[in-house]
Amino acid sequence: MDTITDYRISRIADYDLLSFLKDINCTGMQFKLLRFWGRHPKAKLSLHTIARALDTSTINLRDAITNLVGKGILTAQHNSDGLTTYALSEQQTLEYIDELGSLDWNEAMNLEKQLKAKTVLPADKSE
């Protein structure tokens, strides 16, 4: 019986996470960035360092990071040398970012597929 309850809780949590991602109009690159910060919540990194870690170009990241900063999910800090570093902001979305970081590869791929779908279906309460 505990397995069924755990599955229902997991489905509700997945639905909440998917709803959060849809609410912020999360793109594929933003999804990758949020998963990255979910695995490294204390990281304060430059655009170039993040690009290297995600094996992508800074051009691909710039808009996604700027958008997440604009939504208050990431913060940008400029130092006196002109270097900008980005970090996860301290806000209520931290719970979702932490959950994204704990997903295994299969769970992340399923969530990303659902994110790309046009509609969000509520969790089936009859299961």
Image (cartoon, grey):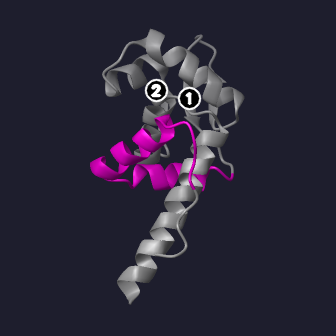
Quarter of the figure that contains the N terminus: bottom left
| Secondary structure mostly seen in the magenta stretch | helix
Q: Residue at x 50, y 73 (%)?
A: 9
Where disc 2 sits, the SS reads: helix
Marks 2 and 1, the one that precedes in the sequence:
2
- Return the residue nearer the eye: 32 or 94: 32
Residue tagged by mark 2? 29
Residue 17 point in image, percent of width and height = 55, 53
Q: Residue at x 56, y 35 (%)?
A: 87
Residue 113 point in image, percent of width and height = 41, 40
Residue 105 point in image, percent of width and height = 29, 47
Q: Amino acid at mark 2?
A: Met
Q: Is residue 75 magenta?
A: no
Residue mark closest to the camera, 2 vs 1 = 2
Q: Which range of residues does the magenta coloring cover? A: 92-121
Residue 84 appears in view: no
- Return the residue nearer the eye: 126 or 89: 126
Within 10 angstroms of label 2, few (less than 14), some, or many (20 or more) residues?
Answer: some
Structural distance between the alpha carbons of marks 2 and 1? 15 Å
Residue tagged by mark 1? 86
74 horizontally vs 61: left or right? right
Residue 70: quarter of image: top right
Q: Is residue 108 magenta?
A: yes
28 horizontally vs 122: left or right? left
Q: Residue pushed farthest bottom?
A: 1
